[in-house]
Image (spheres, rainbow, N blue to C red):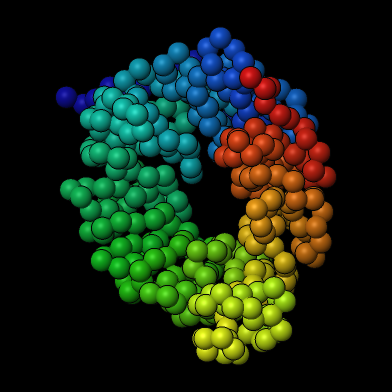
Amino acid sequence: MTPTAPTVAADSRAASRPSAGNARFLVWNDRGAQGRRYGFIDARGILRIPCELADAYEFQSGVARVRDHGRWKFINEQGTVVCELSPGVPFCGDFSEGMAFANLGGRFNVDTVVGGKWGFINIRGKFIAPPRFAGYDFPVRSFREGLAAVKIDGKWGFVDQHSQAVIPARYDDVAGFSDNRAAVRLGKWGFISSGGEMVVPAKYDDVQSFSAGFAAVRSGDHAAFIDKSGAERFSVADWDDWSQFSEGLAAVRLAAAGPVPPDARCDECSGLIGGFLYGDACPHCGKRITGTRACYIDEAGKPQIETPFAELRPFADGLAAVKTAGPSARWGFIDRKGKLVIAPKFHDVRGGFRDGLCQVSMKKDQEEQYDTYIDRSGRIVWQAPAN
C-alpha cells in the first residue's frame, strides 16, 4: 500500500527567501514553566516570533523548521505556518533547493529515527515520490546542486529531484555536491562529477568539499589544497587548523620562518631556543626547529593577512573571528585588512556574521550555548534571559 503523504496546512503557499531586513535569528528562553522554548529576533534584536516553540532551527531557503504540539511545521519570517506535516512524520530536514528529506512511519529515538521509510517533500509538504529509502541513522541527505545522497543496501549514491537514481549506490560514504564535485569514499576518498565520473582518484585519507574551486585533502601527514582537476595547488602545515575559502581567503597554518620567539622551547627536549631561526638545529638535542603561523591566504596560495592569533575562522560579511592564545584565550574579530575591530572578549563564537549579527558565548560555563547576539560593532543586541 502506498504510504499516505503528510497533510498540508490551509496556507501552503511557498515562502520566498527573506531580505536582509527581514532576516530572523534563532533565540531561546529557559525561564518558562515548560523549560526551554524557541523564537526568533530580527537584526535589531527585536523579538519577532515569540519564544513559544518546543523546537526550532535556523531559517533556510526562506522558511524555518519548527516543532510544536508534537508536529513538524515550516514557518515564514512572520511566523505564519506555510506547511504542516502529519503526525506520521517523526522527523524532517531543512529545505534546500526546494526539497527537504522526511521520514514517514518511523519513530524518533534520542538522536535518530527507527523504522519507517525516507523520501523528499516539497514546500507544500507532499512527498515527490513514495518514500522508499530505509535504514538507521538518516539514509538520505539534503539536495546540493540538484542531487541528493541516498543510502541503498549499505552503499551511497545520488538521486535527482524526482527521486530517481542518477548515480548508482556504490560508495562507502559521500558528501553533497559543491562546485560540481562530490567527495566519495571507496576505501579512500576522491571526487566525482555530477555525471558520476571519477575526476579525482580515490587516494586520500581525508578530504573536505570544494569551495571557490578548491578542496583541502590529506594523505598521511601531507595536507594541501587541490583544484577541480585534482592538481595540487599549495600545501598547508596543519590539517587540523584551516578553513575553506570564503570571500576569497582561507585560514591556514603555514610553516613558520624567521626568528624563534624569545621564550620558545624545543618540542623535543623543552630547552630554550629563543634567538635561533626556524630551520636551525636545537642547541640542546639537535632536532630541527619547526613551527607554524596562522594566516589567511588568497586563491593563489599567497599569505595576505599575517596574524598573531592562535585560531582563525573564515571571513563572513567582511569580518573573521580570531582567538588569542593562552589560558585566558578569548575570541574577537578582524576586518579584511587584519585590523582588530571587535576586542577579544568572547568565550566562543558560532560560525560568523550573517545579516549583521553573530552568535557568541559570553560566559565560560556556557561555552557552546551561544546565548548572545552581537552586531558588527560588538554591541550586544540580544542575550537570553538568565535562569
Using the rendered image of the protein, determine whether residue 359 is visible from the camera's viewpoint. Answer: no
Residue under the image location 52 percent in, 89 percent down: 286
Say whether residue 312 is left or right of residue 70.
right
Quadrant in the picture for residue 53: top right
Quadrant of the frame with the N terminus: top left
Residue 208 place in picture, x, y as percent: 45, 62
Number of on-image labels: 0
Question: Where is the C terminus found, in terms of image quarters?
Answer: top right
Q: Nearer the viewer, residue 38 or 267?
A: 267
At a point 50% along the width and 77% down the height, the residue shown is 268
Residue 111 location in percent, x, y? 36, 33
Which x, y percent locates residue 245? 60, 64
Q: In this picture, is 11 found above or below 176?
A: above
> Outermost residue, top direction?
33
- Location of residue 355 with respect to 116 vertically, above or below: below
Look at the image and tell me whether residue 95 can be seen. yes
Position of residue 168 in the picture relative to residue 362 (left or right): left
Q: Nearer the viewer, residue 224 or 2?
A: 224
- The picture quadrant where one finds residue 258 is bottom right
Q: Depth check: give the residue in front, 108 or 386.
A: 386
* Residue located at (49% from left, 68% from top): 239
Please state which of residues 43 and 30 is positioned toward the viewer in this rendering. 30
Q: Quadrant of residue 294?
A: bottom right
Residue 213 screen position, x and y as percent: 54, 69
Left or right? Give the position of 315 relative to 267. right
Query: Which residue is at 42% across, 71% downward?
Result: 218
